[in-house]
């Protein structure tokens, strides 16, 4: 649930951090890289952060969910054709998660590394 009075969520687009507007009485869901890969880039996984507010307290709860670590993810076959080729290579979930932490610690975005 989005707090109706305290913002702080930002997304990165074209090298600029943008404030996400507060929409009262909503549930905010940020999809992850696995969804971006499986949707062949139709749904985007935003690079995001939360900035602190010195005047108001804000509580953030992050929940991660992932499929079986041994599973391979790739663009859905129904979303790939000659006009829209696969944008991402096949990758094991466990390898992607391990790579994500390595890339993140170096200030890089892993999704770019699995693009074809």
Image (tube, helix red, strand yellow):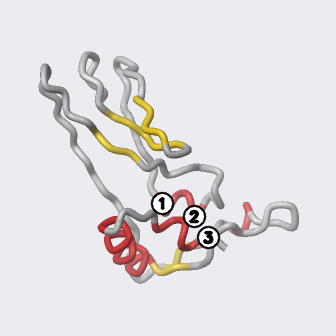
Tell me residue 58's x, y (percent). Answer: 17, 29
Is 90 placed above or below 103 here? below
Tell me residue 37's x, y (percent). Answer: 57, 64
Horizontal side of residue 78 vs 53, given as left or right:
right
N-term mark: 3 or 1: 1
Label 2 secondary element? helix
Which disc number belongs to residue 33?
1
Q: Which of the pair 22/17 is nearer the observer?
A: 17
Q: Which of the pair 37/103 is nearer the observer?
A: 103
Assign the N terminus to one quadrant of the image.
top left
Q: Which is more foreground, mark 2 or mark 3?
A: 3
Label 1 secondary element? helix
Structural crowding at the residue carrying mark 3, measured as other residues with C-alpha within 10 Å and reported as few (<14), some (14–19) or many (≥20): some
Residue at x 40% of width, y 69% of height: 67
Q: Which of the pair 19/89 is nearer the observer?
A: 19
- Report which residue position mark 3 lands on: 115
Q: Which is more foreground, mark 3 or mark 1?
A: 3
Disc 1 and disc 2 in contact, CB within 8 angstroms: yes
Horizontal side of residue 33 vs 55, given as left or right:
right
Which disc number belongs to residue 37?
2
Count of numbered marks: 3
Is 48 placed above or below 26 here? below
Residue at x 30% of width, y 67% of height: 105
Which disc number belongs to residue 99?
none
């Amino acid at each position: 649930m989005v707090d109706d009075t305290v913002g702080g969520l930002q997304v990165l687009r074209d090298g600029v951090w943008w404030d996400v507007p507060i929409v009262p009485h909503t549930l905010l869901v940020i999809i992850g890289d696995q969804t971006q890969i499986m949707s062949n880039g139709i749904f985007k996984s935003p690079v995001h952060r939360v900035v602190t507010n010195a005047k108001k307290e804000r509580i953030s709860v992050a929940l991660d969910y992932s499929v079986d670590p041994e599973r391979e993810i790739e663009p859905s076959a129904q979303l790939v054709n000659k006009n829209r080729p696969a944008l991402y290579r096949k990758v094991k979930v466990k390898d992607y998660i391990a790579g994500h932490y390595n890339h993140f610690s170096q200030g890089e975005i892993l999704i770019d590394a699995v693009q074809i």
